[in-house]
Image (cartoon, helix red, strand yellow):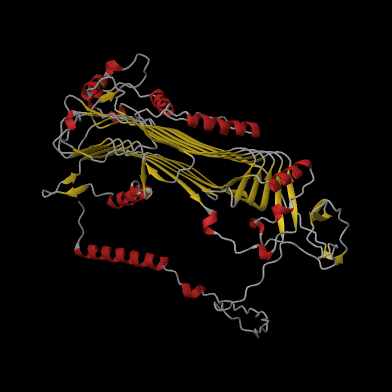
């Protein structure tokens, strides 16, 4: 080691400090030496042109005491030019002809001499075209998951529940329905055949089946029926199912994240050991609102028959035979039971009681008319079919490893929605040469397979709190048919109506004077007339079907590495909701209907509830089934053709042994 004397050491320190000061001086930047004179830019100001604006008048607000109402425009335009009336034959009780049709002779003096009159020309009116809508909404979802969570080192391979069992249950529920499946009708003949077939099938309903809650067939049905009972108020779906549960639950979970650990008294980090398994919670919704106000008249004259049929068919079918292990007998069982509702409403809006005309014969009657014609049939058809088929048969084995574990293998949401509002044309008089076929049909069905199995391995045990829920399902059918028309609106044809019908059939298009003097037309200057040479077919058909298979098989096992007996367990395999909601508002008539043939009216309500307690699984002991289906994973179980690397599987968590069938819709934590 080299030593320096006192003076040499002082000089060395001085030279070192000198070098540091020199380097600092070299690195300093003298910004003042590079100051740049900032250029001054002068921007020319743009000219501003001001405009003079004056408001010499002050706008006043709405005055509610202002009583003036502008008169409504005349429906019929009448020029003031006077012309001579054409000569009128003595044997005719009509005046001159307008547009090829004779008008009533209302313009003679006391001596019978034709008077000067105003020659009027009516505006052209459009006929309502046929409207045929076919809607088909279908959703199909397969969410059959397999999961294995925890270090149990086991594989659970039970017999899977295929869709054949669910479809078999659907066939059994369909056998209860009085109505069969109908092909989509396109022609008027096919539509009439569908309506007649519906009437025949509804007349032949057997009423001795145990599943039938109510079967009513009458000329008219009024009121609200819930599960076969007449009630005063309609149940509200929000009282039984909340659609915001998922959103609120997600918000609460987001606020509680990170709260599963804490510092214990000895300074170690403790983990909230829990296991949550949710394999249900599916929601299926079919919703239809149909309002048909396509055409109507104050008076309807029908040469043929008037056939009317309104029907609501509702069926709920549930298979909920659960096999629960005795190992969870000490757990808390959710007391929520399955709820099934068939809700049907028939209501009739009587327009005669709510709207009375102030017009009378003193106000005069129409002197002329305008006609629009439809040669053939007028079809007003809305055919809606909605179906949801969902399979959520989950299989899983799970154990607690002293951590927070959450598995969500369900919680699917499927919705079909349709809203139809048809607002068309109104006439004073509708003349139909054929018949009227009017039918409103709603068919609703819910089918749920929820045969769950919760079993345990032979060594499973737990001392912590636990809860399980395998029911709590909701099956909801709600339907309403509301018709607009007078309760006592049907009558036979009078002679003047028959003469008018014959005149239009012959092509003359003459309205009998006695018909013009009907009280229904008092106060009108002229008539808007629709003539249909064929039939009027009004068919509103809604068919809604929900099919859900949610037969879950869950095995509870012990962790082979670090079992935690104090973990909290929550297992939920039910809580599904199948909802059908349909409404039909149909305009029949706003006045009287006169029929030349027969009048047939039938309203039918059919409600059925099928509950089956026969389990699909062959072994009634869930633990025995689990132990038969559980396999220990080791090297000898690998197939010879399996090129997977060899591990000591007994020491590996099950996540490395099995694959998650649905990785997107499952959350697995350790």
Is residue 589 rendered to the left or right of residue 527?
A: left
Looking at this rendering, what residue extends furthest in the top direction? 640
Camera-side residue of 354 and 333: 354
Residue at image point 67% right, 65% down: 363
Is residue 601 rendered to the left or right of residue 303?
A: left
Instruction: Reply above or below: 31 against 189.
Output: below
Residue at image point 69% right, 47% down: 497
Is residue 488 rendered to the left or right of residue 572?
A: right
Looking at this rendering, what residue extends furthest in the left direction? 266
Camera-side residue of 545 and 377: 377
Query: Can see residue 315?
Result: yes
User: To which quarter of the image does residue 650 belong?
Assistant: top left
Residue 43 screen position, x and y as percent: 63, 78
Camera-side residue of 421 and 429: 429
Is residue 154 rendered to the left or right of residue 385?
A: left
Instruction: Reply above or below: 161 against 46.
Output: above
Camera-side residue of 402 and 266: 402
Q: Quadrant of the C terminus?
A: top left
Looking at this rendering, what residue extends furthest in the front direction? 111
Residue 96 screen position, x and y as percent: 83, 56
Instruction: Reply above or below: 355 against 46.
Output: above
């Amino acid at each position: 080691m080299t030593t320096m004397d006192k003076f040499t050491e002082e000089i060395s320190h001085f030279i070192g400090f000198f070098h540091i000061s020199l380097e600092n001086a070299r690195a300093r930047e003298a910004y003042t030496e590079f100051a740049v004179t900032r250029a001054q830019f002068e921007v020319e100001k743009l000219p501003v042109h001001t405009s003079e604006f004056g408001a010499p008048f002050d706008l006043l607000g709405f005055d509610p005491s202002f009583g003036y109402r502008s008169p409504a425009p005349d429906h019929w335009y009448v020029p003031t030019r006077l012309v001579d009336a054409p000569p009128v034959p003595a044997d005719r009780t009509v005046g001159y002809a307008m547009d090829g049709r004779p008008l009533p002779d209302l313009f003679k003096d006391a001596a019978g001499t034709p008077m000067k009159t105003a020659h009027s020309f009516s505006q052209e009116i459009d006929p309502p075209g046929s409207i045929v809508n076919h809607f088909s909404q279908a959703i199909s979802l397969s969410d059959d998951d397999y999961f294995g969570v925890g270090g149990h080192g086991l594989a659970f391979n039970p017999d899977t529940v295929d869709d054949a069992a669910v479809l078999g249950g659907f066939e059994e529920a369909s056998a209860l329905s009085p109505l069969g499946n109908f092909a989509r009708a396109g022609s008027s003949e096919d539509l009439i055949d569908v309506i007649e077939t519906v009437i025949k099938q509804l007349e032949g309903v057997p009423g001795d089946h145990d599943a039938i809650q109510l079967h009513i067939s009458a000329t008219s049905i009024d009121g609200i029926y819930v599960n076969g009972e007449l009630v005063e108020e309609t149940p509200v779906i929000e009282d039984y199912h909340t659609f915001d549960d998922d959103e609120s639950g997600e918000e609460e979970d987001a606020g509680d994240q990170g709260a599963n650990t804490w510092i214990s008294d000895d300074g170690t980090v403790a983990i909230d050991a829990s296991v949550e398994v949710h394999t249900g919670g599916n929601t299926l919704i079919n919703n239809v609102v149909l309002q048909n106000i396509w055409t109507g008249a104050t008076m309807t004259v029908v040469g043929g028959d008037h056939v009317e049929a309104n029907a609501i068919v509702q069926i709920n079918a549930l298979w909920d035979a659960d096999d629960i292990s005795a190992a969870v007998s000490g757990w808390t069982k959710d007391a929520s039971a399955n709820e099934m509702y068939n809700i049907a409403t028939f209501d009739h809006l009587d327009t005669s009681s709510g709207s009375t005309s102030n017009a009378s014969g003193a106000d005069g009657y129409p002197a002329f008319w305008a006609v629009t014609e439809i040669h053939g049939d007028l079809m007003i058809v809305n055919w809606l079919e909605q179906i949801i088929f969902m399979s959520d048969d989950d299989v899983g084995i799970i154990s607690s490893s002293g951590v927070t574990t959450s598995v969500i293998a369900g919680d699917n949401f499927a919705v079909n929605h349709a809203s139809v509002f048809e607002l068309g044309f109104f006439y004073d008089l509708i003349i139909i040469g054929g018949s009227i076929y009017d039918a409103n049909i709603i068919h609703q069905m819910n089918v749920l397979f929820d045969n769950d199995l919760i079993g345990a391995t032979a060594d499973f045990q737990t001392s912590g709190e636990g809860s399980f829920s395998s029911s709590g399902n909701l099956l909801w059918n709600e339907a309403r048919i509301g018709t607009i028309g007078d309760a006592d609106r049907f009558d036979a044809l009078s002679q003047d109506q028959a003469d008018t019908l014959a005149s239009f059939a012959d092509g003359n298009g003459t309205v009998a004077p006695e018909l013009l003097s009907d009280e229904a037309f008092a106060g009108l200057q002229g008539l808007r007339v629709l003539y249909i040479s064929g039939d009027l077919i009004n068919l509103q058909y809604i068919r809604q079907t929900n099919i859900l298979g949610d037969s879950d098989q869950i095995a509870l096992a012990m962790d082979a590495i670090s079992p935690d007996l104090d973990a909290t367990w929550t297992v939920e395999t039910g809580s599904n909701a199948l909802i059908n909601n349909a409404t039909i508002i149909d305009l029949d008539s706003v006045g009287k209907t006169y029929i030349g043939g027969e009048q047939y009216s039938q309203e039918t309500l059919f409600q059925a509830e099928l509950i089956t307690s026969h389990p699909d699984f062959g072994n009634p002991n869930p633990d025995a089934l689990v132990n038969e289906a559980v396999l220990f994973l080791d090297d000898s179980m690998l197939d010879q053709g399996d090129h997977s690397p060899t591990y000591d599987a007994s020491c590996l968590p099950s996540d490395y042994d099995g694959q998650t069938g649905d990785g997107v819709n499952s959350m697995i934590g350790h």
